[in-house]
Image (cartoon, helix red, strand yellow):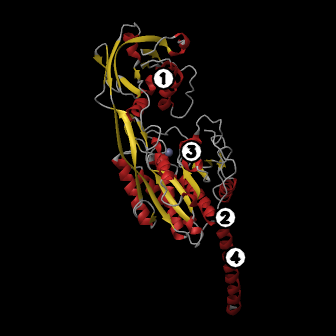
Amino acid sequence: MKKINSKILVFIISSFHLLVMSSSLLAQKANPPGLKYIKESELKKDLYALADAHFNGRSAGTLDELKASMWLAEKYRSIGLLPAGDDGTYLQFFNLWRNHISDKSVIKINNKTAKLWNEVAVAQMANASIVAPIIYLGNAADIDTLQLDIKNKVVAIEASSKGININVSLPTWRYSRSVQAKYVMPLIRKGASAVIIIADDFAEKAWDDAAENFKRGNYDIDGGPNVTLTTTVPILWMHANAKADLQNNTAFMNANIIVDKYSYPSVNIIGKINGTDPKLKEEYVLYSGHQDAHGIRNAHNNDSTYYGADDNASVDVAMLASARAFMKNPAKRSILFVIHGAEERGLLGSRYYVQHPTVPIKNIVTVLNGDMIGRNHIDSAAFLGMQSPHKNSTELVNLILAANNEGPKFKLDTAYDKVTHVEGWYFRSDHLPYARLGIPAVMYTTLLHEDYHTPLDNAENINYPKLKKMADWMYRSAWKVANLAKRPATDANFKLER
Ligand SMILES: [Zn+2]
């Protein structure tokens, strides 16, 4: 009995062993080897640290952005990435040019000083010295610009929402600029020397958000369009109660508006894991995110820190998780991790990097960018660059679709990637400068939500199981690209619509 039993036992054990071996072989085929090292617990721990109040919302060009960047560089080091920035470090510093309204500016209406940002907001900056009467033109929607003679005149109008779409993301950030584009630009083309806009109801609601943006001014890198101010015509916003003074056509302006210009540093954080193939290791799969958020601003629900947990700490911590996975099991190609600075100021870090790449740019075979990957329903996601004209590599797109099918099986949104989509989302993140060079590039995202660019984009509101699924998907995609025999081809005739 005992003997027979042990024979049977040996048989059972060895068949079980075979079963385990074959199923693990199957699993290995479906799952890239480092997948198990991407852990929800680590994603969560890193995200809470990076989106902590300690970093004050990581505004570009501030010490807070630099502090967060040092934290990320230290993470790279502890994970074991090789430095791939400048001078043997993880860092690539670059200069931001900033133009903003000097506190020394003085704007007086009827000899009474209007308090900068509280009573008057400068929406279009210009160095200007103005002593002139103010001509009131009425409501923006009722003005017949054809009949106007306003050359070298200071004019005032009342804002109108007529013909302006406020059903977009961040309407309070965008409304003032939409009004200016629609109603003020025609006045400037007619020769107005300054324009005052009196806030309507929606502009009053949007005032705090808009003023914060105007206060910050313009940012750019060397060679960019915002380095030098090109206009001499200031655009000012005043509150609805200013109408009483302005509408009688007896008001007078006395203003000295000064624009300060200076440079200060931002930084890209760059590390790599060398590939295992003697030839293919010269090529790079580039993971992309950004560390900056929106800093300290006007409060929402008594909180004034714009933590940027989803935007974009979510992607940074997914990159750290992927780095851990690739460290355990390197791929044939090298993996380059680039967390870009100053994305929120106009994709400045990525625009700088493509001009000053730290590896040969022709050896970057794919860019997998992510922006906001930790919110909304656990089964939904998107990647932009999957449809024409945004699609620049059919081969890469197919591979990412396959990675989705093999792993997270997200139901993919296709609306945001369409040219007709109101958000123009494709043009708003760091894959863009790379795509413009013809490098196969996509952007992973879980799309917009109502906490976008508010203090409620915080660590508590991240969906961690979902973030884990997104990190898995990006890793699966990267693993595939990094082991292809031949790099993904760029589609012929790829051309973006703007
Ligand atoms: Zn972002």
Of pointers 1 and 3, the one earlier in the residue sequence: 1
Q: Residue at x 67, y 53 (%)?
A: 393
Marks 4 and 2 sit apart, C-alpha to C-alpha, by: 34 Å
Residue type at mark 2 is Lys
Marks 4 and 1 sit apart, C-alpha to C-alpha, by: 66 Å
Residue type at mark 1 is Phe
Q: Which mark is residue 202?
A: 1
Of pointers 4 and 1, the one earlier in the residue sequence: 4
Name the residue that disc number 4 marks: 19
Local secondary structure at mark 2: loop
State the residue lying farthest toward the bottom: 3
Please state the horizontal and vertical placement of residue 289, each as a whole percent of the image.
Answer: 50, 52
Number of residue marks: 4
Q: Residue at x 44, y 20 (%)?
A: 199
The reply to whether callout 4 and callout 2 are in contact (CB within 8 Å) is no
Please state the horizontal and vertical placement of residue 383, each as a whole percent of the image.
Answer: 62, 48
